Image (cartoon, rainbow, N blue to C red):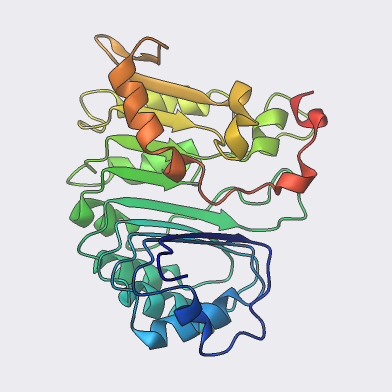
Amino acid sequence: MQSLEYLDLSAISFEHADAEVPFLFNAENLRTLKLRKCLGSLNLLELASSSGKWTELKYFELVLTNSGPTTTTKIICNFIHSAPKLETLCLMLREPINRETLISTIRRCSSLKRLVMHSLADERNPVLGGEGMPWPSGLEHLLQDKQLACFGTSTPPRELVNQLQGLQARPSCKLLHIRATGPAMVNMYRSNICDPLYHPLDIYEFAEWAFSAEGLPDLTVLAWGEFSHEGHFSEHNSLFCRSKTGYRRLNASEISLWDLINDNMDMLAACPYTDTNVLSRTDFL
């Protein structure tokens, strides 16, 4: 394990982890750590942050399906603080959690370039689970202060535009990902089960604003949908870019824009809502 730099773990248990586990993962040299729905993740993170050895970690992804408002926030913040070179942070956390404290910690990450913040409200609900993350207090200051190159959120387009319009200094992100989960995208045009937070026209209204003179001046690509699971929901996703008259869909021939997307596909695909074992052909019907 001495040369290990990349670790991606899903649905395994750390409930009985002991103090030696972080060292088995070669914490001193690990550059990427992904923990997706791992039982006892908080136990591992608490042990890891106390080791103080995460000096080279640049990418951290955490999908947490259980939490408490006090202990969860403290453990996650302590771990983030123990990774001084962190450049990419991707989180999908179950409520309740103290997002204001979390954002305050993230604002102190001097090397952060990319941020993904999704929400997991109720994973038993195939439409609403993972949708509609409320706008946390302080997030607007983070977006202005950090000048992130890429930002991913579950905040619905209608709410997101209201929040961004109120900022004195616009975020400088080149790539913005607004995620609606795969099931929500599939059901968006089914009036009987669609999520009221995601109207089919909202993303077009957001794109019109984002690429306008009053919008996001540095925005290069707006990504809409769920890009996890190697393109399983790709037919429902949309990619928009700037045009002379506003915005348009991305063309396959625009190599430089696709380079931006491909270089950040790890961020776009981060924190998948739907588990691989429940994906089926019925998703496309």
Q: Is residue 70 visible?
A: no
Rendered position, 282 above or below 84: above
Q: Is residue 225 visible?
A: yes
| Residue at (32% x, 50% y) in the render | 114
Asked whether, in this view, residue 198 is left or right of residue 45, the answer is right
| Residue at (29% x, 67% y) in the render | 56
Asked whether, in this view, residue 277 is left or right of residue 152, the answer is right
- Rendered image quadrant of residue 164: top left
Asked whether, in this view, residue 192 is left or right of residue 77, the answer is right
Q: Quadrant of the C terminus?
A: top right
In front: 3, or 125? 3
In front: 121, or 116? 116
Residue 252, x across and y down, in percent: 42, 12
Q: How many marks?
A: 0
| Residue at (52% x, 53% y) in the render | 133
Rendered position, 175 above or below 135: above
Residue 111, x across and y down, in percent: 22, 60
| Residue at (64% x, 30% y) in the render | 233
- Rendered image quadrant of residue 58: bottom left
Asked whether, in this view, residue 123 is left or right of residue 81, the answer is right
In front: 198, or 176? 176
Residue 8, x across and y down, in percent: 54, 58
